[in-house]
Image (cartoon, helix red, strand yellow):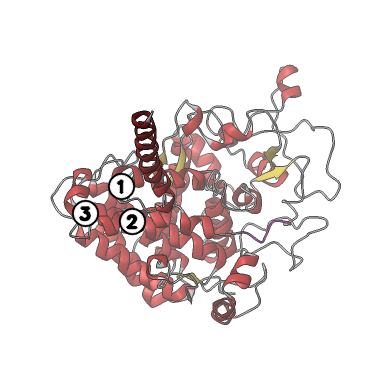
Amino acid sequence: MKNMLNKAILALLVFAFTACGDFGDLNVNPNKPVAVDTESLLTQSLRSIGGDNFNTFIGVLDNDRIGPIYAQHIANITYTDDDRYQAVQSDFSAWYNGPLADLDRIIKLNTNEETKDAASKSGSNANQIAAARILKAYYFQLLTDLWGPMPYSEALQGDDGLFTPAYDSQEAIYQALFTELQDAVAQMDSGAGVAGDFIFGGDMAAWAKFANTIRMNMAIRAADANETLAKAQFLDAIADGVIESDLMYPYLSEANNENPWFTAFRTRTDFALTEMLVDGMKDYGDPRLQRYADPTLNSVSAGNPEYVGMPYGLAEPTTQPPDVSYPNSTYVKAQNAPLAIYTMAQVNFAKAEAAARGWTTDNPEDHYKAAIEASWDQWSVDYDQAAFDAYYNQEGISWDAGKWGQLIGYQKWLALFGQGYEAWTEWRRLDYPELVLPEDPLSPSGGIPIRLIYPASAENLNPANYQQALQLLGGPDSDGTHLWWDVK
């Protein structure tokens, strides 16, 4: 009996020690594991670009379709409050806790003497750090272009106990990002390229072109705010080499990596192209319309396909789905349809604007025409030179040096279909085309938003630095306060 009791006690002790080991896992931070596969961290960080391709920030912003809606490429059919700007206050914390934290972790694991050798199995330490720095810069630019002043220099320092970071001005962030991108490219070495990279395939030369394209885009955006800085950065980025073909995000024919438009239309038909977009393209005979949109269902049934846009921002939404054009089933919302990150149209529009500003001796019209044609090619438009010339030579499209801002503004807005946040941002900067003010706007400013409002948590959890952010912003925390580069 005594032996049986001793055996029972021993068994309980063994179980207890085993259980203690299991419970000990509760003290381990799952977001900061001791052993991390940096390859997986990079893959996950790159997947966040996929949300931006819908220009949605899926699962991050309060409304995950703000970009194309605010750009007025897309209108809601029934739930029109977003078209009337009800969701202008949005949270950014998931970006700091998600991809930015993962990228920062890649940098630390490839820098720390205790972990860098193990991390090097996913590419040379220098190349992994460079790629992470470039992608961080890409995300930080997106964030500051949405909200303005943001935590940057003191961001991502929670490991050191800094949970209430200061905000940096948008100008300071831009200047820091220009330097960060240049230094990241200079850091690349001849070692192995980065693993887990499903966009560039570990090609560090492609990463360098990506970095230079980000700089080029930022430089054009900053042109009216700091022309000296913008011109120098633009010319340097072009000289160092930008993308030479469309850079697309590769979606797959499977649910975990599918095109987000496909997801949105899986069981619903909530979104249609706007009346403004469709009517304008029809007026000019723009063949991209057949790639952007599907003809209405009734017109197809009648054997006479027609494209009809949805009125934007109705105060009294329709309860019955109207016969309107949805995003194209093949080129936009197929499950594996790729969407653009940066395109040759953007590169050529940037070159056209730089020439129009006198930064280069190039002929701006040559780049402007090349930009429009590059957009047609991106969308696989079937055309010959005569068809393109007939489109281009119309009044309101053909080059006029005295109206370069208006012409580039409209054509760039058209070309950025599928890149909603970028389209909204360029509209905010160039002020073209003239977008539609909804019947009864719900935005605090009463107008079309020109920035996102900080989340309530920014004021509640970091009040002193929130007040500092407003001073840097130079106005109230309103959707009507201009950002640094939005000079009027």
Quadrant of the rendered image containing residue 76:
top right
Task: Give the mark, 1 or 2, whose residue is nearer the N terminus.
Answer: 1
Task: Give the mark, 1 or 3, whose residue is nearer the N terminus.
Answer: 1
| Residue 291 image point, x, y percent | 56, 33
Q: What label does residue 105 carry, if any? A: 2
189 relative position to 180: left or right: left
14 is within the stretch colored magenta: no
Residue tagged 1: 36
Q: What label does residue 463 carry, if any? A: none
Residue tagged 3: 115
Residue 238 in the image: above or below residue 53: below
At a point 27% along the width and 64% down the height, the residue shown is: 182
87 relative position to 345: left or right: right
**Element assignment for label 3:** loop
Q: How many marks do you count on the picture?
A: 3
Task: Give the mark, 3 or 2, whose residue is nearer the N terminus.
Answer: 2
Quarter of the image with the C terminus in it: bottom right
Quadrant of the rendered image containing residue 287:
top right
Badge 1: how crowded within 10 Å, few (<14), some, or many (20+)? some
Q: CA distance from mark 3 to mark 2?
A: 11 Å
Please name the amino acid that badge 1 sits on. Answer: Val
**Element assignment for label 2:** helix
Of residues 248 and 263, the one nearer the viewer is: 263
Q: Look at the numbered discs 3 and 2 and tell me whether their residues touch, using CB distance below 8 Å.
A: no
